[in-house]
Structure formats: C-alpha cells, structure tokens
C-alpha cells in the first residue's frame, strides 16, 4: 500500500514538471515569433533651430555725406515697417536744410568768383591790346630810324650820330617791350588761373552740397517689403522713428523680397551625418505655430566653427529653402526645421 502511494506520488511529480516545461517553452516561442514580426521603431526626427532670411534683400543705411563733417542726420519722413514698396518708391527722407543752405551759399560765392575771373580776363585783354599797340609804335619808330640811317651819307656828322642813337634806342625799346610783353602775359595768366581754381573749388563744393541734398532722399532699390532693423539709439535698442537722429553709414532698414525665403541653422558635428543635400524638411515658425512650410536642404557651409562646449566639436551652417508664402513669413523670425534622417538619406542616395 505504502509502495503504491510512493509510486503514484512520483508519477504526479514527473507529470507536473513536464507540464511546466511545456508551458514555458510555448510562451518563449510565442515571444520570439512576435518580436520577429514587430516593425522596427522609426528613426527620431532631427529638429534644428535657426532664423529666417530673404534670398533677395537690400540693406539701407544712413547716407555718407561727402566733403562735410556731419555728426547726425535727422529723419523727417519714414515708411513704416511691413510696407510693401515698388522699385523707386521713397523709403526715408532726412533733414536737408543744411545741405540746401550750403548749396545756395556756395552757388552765390561761385557766381561772385566767376565774375572776378571775367573781370580779370577783361583787364588782361585791355592790357594786352595796349601793350600790342606800344609794340606796334616801337616797330614804327624803328622803321623810321632805319630810313633815317639810309640817308646818313647826306647828313652831317652830328645828324648822323643822332640818327644812329635814335636807331639804337628804337631797337632797345622794341626788344624791351617784347620781353616785358611775354612776362606780363604770364603774370596775368597766373593771376587768372588762381581765380579760376578758387572758383572751381567753390563750384565743386556746391556740387557736393547738391549731391548731398539728393542723398537725403533714399528710394527703394528693389520691390519688396520694408523691414526696420533693431539698432542702438539713444542708449537703447529699438527701431528708428521719424524725428530720430542717426549717424551716417548706419544700416537701419532692409527691403526684402518675401517671395523667396530660406532658413539658416547651425548644425553640430554629430547631427551633420544625418543631413544630405536635397533632403526634405518641414519648417515651423515659433511665432506662428499654425504655419508650416515644406523645405529642402540647399547647402552646408564646409567651414565649421568651434562648438560652445568643446573645441573638438564643430558647428556648421546649413541653409534650407522654404516652399510657399504667407504674409506673416518675414526675415529674422526664429524657426524650427524638422528633418527626417531616413528621408534625408534616401533623398541623398536618390540624387546620386
């Protein structure tokens, strides 16, 4: 009886062990088959941060005044930011009173100096005519003295000597008149030339003033939208307004063509491996979350810069084109560029 119970207990234990092993094996095989059928996780989208920029843009700066030391220029008229303009439209006008006043003053001075030149030229013409008359009289006197010398055989000794003296005097007078004539002409021409140089310099200053006056009006070089730059003015950063004063040569405005826009982003050395020229992307504007534009990687700057955290890591500048347009799409807006590394790789391999 006891032996029978022992045998039955041993059989039950063996059956239980076999059952547990079979169940564990069936679960293990199912997990393996399930994992082999499960698709691989999609690669993570690469997000890059940058700024929008216009492909076609012109920078506008305060005019540089020629021939004058100007500290500041005052804005009297200014087109508001965001205004759409055509080529040749007025963008900004500066106070031109100083240039107009200088132009009028120099015009009057130039006219006065020109009158002096004309007056001096008239005096020289009169002096030249007088000297030429004196030379003609001296030539006549010399000719008369020569005629007298031809009659020397008929004259007495005293008269002959007198005739010779008259001839010598006439020859000396003519020679002296001709010599002084040339010296007078050179001196008169030099005096007139000095007056002409003074007149021309004044006229040049007047033309500079007129040109500077024209520079006080700046017209748009291209058709596009006006964008005011943020500059340092009166101790603060801000956009210029009518009545503000600016130093010459400061760029304070842009005219951009919003039809063709791009995004420039810095890319670190590690993320650079996932980018290919021609790769597709999606561009988001941080200021307008409802806007998204398809884009494409156009170029990568081959020259990198040192990273912020380690000099061994390099940063590269990448440019993405933006397809599409919206009135809110403007330059200098922060943007996020989402790049699918798999899509970029396939695009890159396709281009090859």
Image: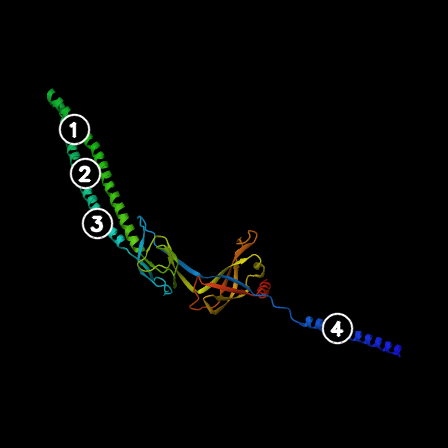
Upstream in sequence: badge 4 or badge 1: 4
Query: Residue tagged by mark 3?
Result: 108
Tell me how far mark 4 sits from mark 1, CA to CA.
150 Å
Mark 4 or mark 3, whichever is nearer to me: 4
Q: Quadrant of residue 78?
A: bottom left
The answer to whether residue 39 is left or right of residue 269 is right
Tell me how far mark 4 sits from mark 3, CA to CA.
112 Å
Query: Residue tagged by mark 1?
Result: 170
Query: Residue tagged by mark 4?
Result: 24
Q: Secondary structure at mark 1?
A: helix
Upstream in sequence: badge 3 or badge 2: 3
Upstream in sequence: badge 3 or badge 1: 3
Q: Is residue 156 visible?
A: no
Residue 86: give its label.
none
The answer to whether residue 262 is left or right of residue 65 is right
- Image quarter in which the C terminus is found: bottom right
Tell me how far mark 3 sits from mark 2, CA to CA.
30 Å
Mark 3 or mark 2, whichever is nearer to me: 3
The answer to whether residue 211 is left or right of residue 5 is left
Residue found 32% across the figure and 52% down from its top: 72
């Amino acid at each position: 009886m006891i032996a029978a119970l022992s045998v039955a207990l041993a059989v039950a234990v063996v059956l239980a062990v076999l059952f547990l092993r079979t169940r564990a094996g069936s679960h293990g095989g199912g997990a393996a088959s399930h994992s082999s059928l499960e698709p691989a996780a999609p690669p993570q989208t690469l997000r890059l941060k940058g700024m929008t920029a216009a492909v076609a843009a012109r920078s506008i700066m305060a005019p540089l005044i020629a021939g004058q030391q100007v500290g500041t220029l005052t804005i009297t008229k200014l087109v508001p930011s965001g205004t759409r303009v055509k080529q040749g439209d007025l963008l900004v006008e500066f106070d031109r009173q100083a240039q107009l006043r200088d132009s009028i003053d120099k015009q009057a001075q130039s006219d006065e100096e020109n009158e002096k030149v004309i007056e001096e030229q008239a005096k020289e013409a009169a002096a030249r005519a007088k000297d030429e008359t004196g030379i003609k009289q001296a030539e006549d006197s010399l000719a008369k003295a020569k005629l007298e010398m031809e009659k020397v055989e008929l004259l007495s000794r005293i008269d002959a000597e007198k005739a010779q003296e008259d001839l010598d005097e006439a020859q000396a007078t003519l020679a002296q008149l001709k010599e002084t004539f040339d010296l007078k002409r050179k001196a008169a021409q030099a005096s007139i030339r000095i007056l002409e140089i003074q007149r021309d310099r004044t006229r040049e200053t007047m033309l500079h003033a007129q040109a500077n006056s024209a520079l006080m009006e700046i017209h748009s070089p291209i058709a596009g939208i006006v964008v005011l730059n943020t500059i340092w003015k009166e101790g603060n950063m801000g956009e210029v307004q009518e009545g503000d004063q600016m130093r010459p040569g400061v760029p304070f405005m842009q005219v951009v063509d919003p039809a063709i826009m791009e995004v420039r982003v810095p890319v670190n050395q590690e993320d650079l491996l996932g980018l290919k020229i021609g790769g597709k992307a999606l561009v988001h504007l941080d200021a307008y979350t409802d806007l998204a534009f398809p884009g494409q990687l156009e170029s990568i700057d081959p020259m990198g810069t040192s990273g912020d955290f380690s000099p061994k890591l390099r940063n590269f500048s990448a440019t993405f084109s933006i397809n599409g347009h919206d009135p809110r799409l403007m330059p200098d807006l922060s943007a996020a560029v989402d790049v699918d590394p798999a899509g970029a790789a396939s695009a890159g391999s396709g281009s090859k």
